[in-house]
Amino acid sequence: MTPLTWTILAMAGVTYGVRLWGLLLPGARLRGYGRRFLDAVPVAVFAALVAGGLPGADAIDGAWRIAAAAVTVVVVARTRGLAAGLLAGLACYLVARALGWA
């Protein structure tokens, strides 16, 4: 198998392993490392999805996508809210598109 195949299988294993863990232990309280691990999953998945689309179609579009991602990071770091960061980054990019800059 190719390295890409192994990577996809590993990602699927982690993703579905975490889901299965949640289904098998509905009443269990997680502490320490397990809790921190599960708290980081949504942010890690979001980052992985966004990172693939950052380069854009050309250099200018890519620069605005990276700027929108930077706005997202700053807002999430300040507010500790993923939704607020998503909205801020999306707004930044949409304004750049509306003004013809991206």
Image (cartoon, rainbow, N blue to C red):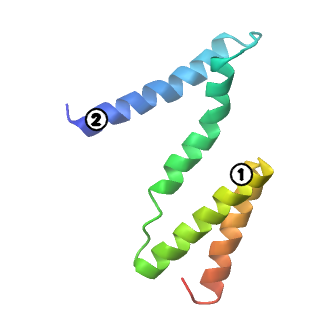
Task: Using a 10 Å C-alpha cutoff, classify the residue at mark 2 as few (fewer than 14 neighbours), some (14 to 19) or many (20 or more).
Answer: few
Element carrying mark 2: helix
Instruction: Name the residue at 54% across, 75% down.
Output: 64
Residue denoted by label 2: 5
Residue that protrudes farthest toward the bottom in the picture: 100
Pointer 1: residues within 10 angstroms few (<14), some, or many (20+)?
few
Disc 2 marks a residue whose amino acid type is Thr
- Classify the position of the C terminus by image quarter: bottom right
The outermost residue toward the left is 1
**Residue 46 location (% of width, % of height):** 58, 47
Q: Nearer the viewer, mark 1 or mark 2?
A: 1
Q: Earlier in the sequence, mark 1 or mark 2?
A: 2
Residue 52 as seen in the image, left or right of residue 76: left
- Which residue is found at the position 58% from the left and 18% from the top? 20
Q: Residue, x 59% and y 63% (percent of image)?
A: 69
**Residue named by callout 1:** 77
Amino acid on which the number 1 mark rests in the picture: Ala
Whether 19 is drawn above or below 71: the answer is above
- Which quarter of the figure is the N terminus placed in? top left
Q: Could you tell me which secondary element the residue under label 1 belongs to?
A: helix
